[in-house]
Amino acid sequence: MSLSINERLDFFETNYDPIATYHLDKGGKLYIGNDDKKCRFCGETEPNVTFSNVAHAVPEFLGNKQLILKNECDTCNTFVSENLENDLDKYTKPFRLAAQIKGKKKVPSYKTKDKKSRFEFSSSEGAKIIDREDSKFANLDIENKSIETNFHLEPHRPSAVFKCLVKIALSVIDDVELSKFTNTISWLLEPDHSKTICKPQILLNAFIPGPKPNKAVTIIVLRRKAESVVAPYCHLVICFGNIAYQIVVPSDVDITNGTQTVKLYRFPLPFEDNRKYGNIKFGQEDITNHEVVRDKMLPMSFSFDEAIKLDPSTVSL
């Protein structure tokens, strides 16, 4: 039997302390780290490395314009961008499009592999789906003003998605907490994603229906209390748009304790009692696989205001 919200809340209040909590929306810049020009990941200092890039503690494509990490060198920043963030970007893109989350420049757009349909957003027209009748992307229900879509996720490596989420957790905590994650950091900087630090790499997910329930990007990192003996040592919870993710953040403490079976408890979400747009859809996924996933489909439902039949000769896809 699953635990109630209050039981789960009591579990986390009894066993964990939040060591980082951020709600990122509009506002001034927030900075993490110090000015000593020593990278918190590789440990290198100037002049061996440079610190010229603006290192976002949470990827900008998730909607973070505020939280900046001072002590991440350009070498590590480039490695993370090319080897980790690229995979999380592709993995989350349909959700960010659906929630109209603006990245570095704009809300992402989507075009089907067969080039027959596209989903895009503009500030002047809002969200718009252009779909050919012979496409398998969308199924229109005119009477109920609903549309069922089937997104094809861009090629991504699930293990890199997991590592990128771990990297977010280690970017938002204070420097003093990093001593418990030395092996984790070495693993993060390992380009071979087949090398794991924990198995399986489970992603707990929740889809909250409705128009962008998470107005901000919320990040919570929870660390086990000194008097507690539960495992794991650390969790990350991150919420954006309609999505909430939770993972175990591997630590040196867990490695020292050796092989153990861990029961994962879902962190209580404020939306669980609000069913205005329907029930939250809870799920979990094993993202240990380091091979490129090319054929994963993601069904998603939307409501719409208006459906217009266009002349195919006037539409460019």
Image (tube, grey):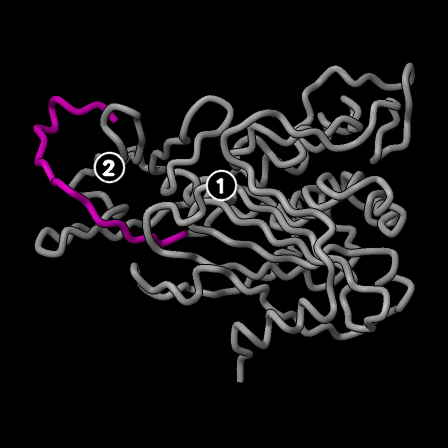
Residue type at the position of mark 2:
Ile
Most foreground residue, 44 or 36: 36
Percent x, y for residue 78?
71, 25
Q: What residue is at 47 percent from the left and 65 percent from the top?
A: 282
Q: What number is the disc on residue 83?
A: none
Task: Give the left or right position of residue 295, taking residue 249 as reference.
Answer: left
Residue type at the position of mark 1:
Ala
Where does label 2 land, which residue? Answer: 129
Q: What residue is at 78 percent from the left and 51 percent from the top?
A: 195
Task: Give the left or right position of residue 172, taking residue 296 as reference.
Answer: right
**Of marks 2 and 1, the one in the foreground:** 1
Q: Residue furthest bottom?
A: 1
Asked which secondary structure carries label 2, the reply is strand
Q: What residue is at 52 percent from the left and 32 percent from the top?
A: 61
Task: Give the left or right position of residue 57, taking residue 61 as reference.
Answer: right
Percent x, y for residue 19?
74, 51
Location of residue 27 with respect to 176 vertically, above or below? above
Task: Give the left or right position of residue 142, taking residue 294 as reference.
Answer: left
304 in the magenta segment? yes
Question: Taking the image as drawn, is residue 244 in sight?
Answer: yes
Location of residue 43 with respect to 3 vertically, above or below? above
The first of marks 2 and 1 along the sequence is 2
- What is the CA distance from the residue labelled 2 to the residue labelled 1? 25 Å
Question: Taking the image as drawn, is residue 82 in sight?
Answer: no
- Which stretch appears magenta? 298-317
Asked which secondary structure carries label 1, the reply is strand
Percent x, y for residue 65?
56, 28
Q: In terms of image quadrants, where is residue 230? A: bottom right
90 in the magenta segment? no
Quarter of the picture holding the C terminus: top left
Q: What number is the disc on residue 216?
A: 1
